[in-house]
Each structure stands twice: as C-alpha cells, then as structure tokens.
C-alpha cells in the first residue's frame, strides 16, 4: 500500500533540496533519518520532519508495519518564485529570485498483522471496565483528612516588607 506526504512552499531552492534527496532515495525511513541527521544542509531538517510525518500517517491512519516501509518516490518540484530587488551599482537595481519548492514523498509498505485501530479499541474497553468506583464514605474520610492538613502560606506574603518596598516596585529607568 502507498502512503504519501507533501511539503509545499519550502523556502529552499529545488536544486539544493534535490542534492539532499538524492542521498536518501530508495532507503527505508529509519536509515534515511539517520543519514539526514548528519547532513549539514538546511534542507535536511524539513525532509526529516516530512519522513517522520509520512511514517506516522502510515502507522496510525493506514495500519502499516513500520519495519516494512520503504521510500518508493521522493520528488522535488519548483514552487512559486518570489522576485525581490536590491540596490546595485550606479543607482541601478539588481533582481533577486527567492525560490521555493514542493516536495512529495511516497512510502510503500504492507499492512501490519493485527490492525492497530482494533488493538486500540480493545485497550480502551479494558481500561474502561477496570475503573474503580469509591464509596461515598471513603471519599468523605479522605476529604476530612485533607482538612486537617495546615494550609501552606504563600512565601511572598510572609517576606518582610521594608520601607523601600514600594519604591523598588515602581522603580523606573532614568532617561
């Protein structure tokens, strides 16, 4: 089964992102994340976030086994280019191109042996049936015991307030 995740409008040029994507193509996600951890390019962090997101989607939404996942497609396309200008020599203007990129990741894997959603529902049923209801007498005893414990006073109220206390609170910097 195939699971896809997208990252749109990343403010890094597609050429720079493709250099990093070329390293982790055709790997399983764990190895790809280990590789990206040690790559010094700026694109490594958003790509690792994208891989983590795709793995979480595959596991939670589609009940796929994380050990069987493999990156089948990692595509980097160009996004919109923002044109900016900066002053140049002799009163001229030189253009700047702020490039963005759209990244598409497709993971391929097989379903887990037992559906995770069914296992979670069974776990919820077990926890709901195991709840213990206390008698009113037991809760009343606990409340009375808590009343006998002296209330801790706030430390700020017990501190000595000297003659310069108000001046210290309203102290202003001189201009």
Image: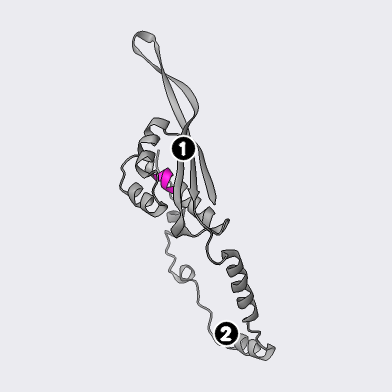
Quarter containing the C terminus: top left
Taking depth in this image into account, of 34 and 66 the one nearest to the observer is 66
Secondary structure type for disc 2:
helix
Mark 2 = which residue? 146
Q: Position of residue 26 (x, y in %)?
A: 40, 45
* In magenta stretch: residue 47: yes
Q: Position of residue 90 (x, y in %)?
A: 34, 8
**Residue 18 found in image quarter:** top left
Question: Disc 2 versus disc 1: distance between alpha carbons?
Answer: 62 Å
Mark 1 = which residue? 75
Taking depth in this image into account, of 107 and 165 the one nearest to the observer is 107
**Residue 95 found in image quarter:** top left
Local packing at callout 1 (Cα closer than 10 Å; few below 14, some 14-19, many 20+) is some
Q: Which of labels 2 and 1 is toward the front?
A: 1
Q: Is residue 73 above or below residue 11?
A: below
The boundaries of the magenta stretch are 45-49
**Would you say the magenta stretch is mainly helix, strand or loop?**
helix
Q: How is the image coloured?
A: one colour
Q: Position of residue 70 (x, y in %)?
A: 44, 51
Tell me which residue sits at (37%, 44%) in the image. 24
Ranked by sequence position, the earlier of labels 2 and 1 is: 1
Q: Is residue 132 above or below residue 113?
A: below
Secondary structure type for disc 1:
strand
Tell me which residue sits at (61%, 73%) in the image. 122
Q: Is residue 126 above or below residue 31?
A: below
Tell me which residue sits at (37%, 49%) in the image. 32
Q: Is residue 13 visible?
A: no
Taking depth in this image into account, of 94 and 23 the one nearest to the observer is 23
């Amino acid at each position: 089964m195939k699971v896809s995740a997208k990252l749109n409008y990343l403010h890094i040029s597609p050429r720079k992102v493709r250099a990093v994507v070329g390293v982790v193509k055709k790997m399983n996600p764990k190895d790809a994340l280990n590789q990206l951890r040690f790559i010094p390019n700026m694109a490594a962090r958003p790509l690792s976030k994208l891989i983590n997101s795709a793995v979480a989607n595959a596991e939670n939404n589609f009940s796929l086994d994380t050990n069987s996942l493999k990156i089948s497609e990692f595509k980097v396309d160009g996004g919109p280019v923002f044109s900016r200008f900066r002053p140049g020599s002799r009163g001229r203007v030189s253009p700047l191109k702020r490039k963005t990129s759209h990244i598409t990741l497709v993971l391929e894997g097989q379903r887990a042996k037992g559906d995770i959603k069914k296992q979670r529902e069974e776990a919820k049923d077990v926890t709901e049936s195991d709840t213990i209801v206390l008698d009113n007498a037991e809760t009343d005893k606990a409340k009375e015991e808590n009343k006998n414990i002296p209330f801790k006073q706030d430390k700020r109220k017990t501190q000595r307030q000297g003659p310069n206390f108000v001046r210290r609170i309203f102290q202003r910097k001189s201009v």
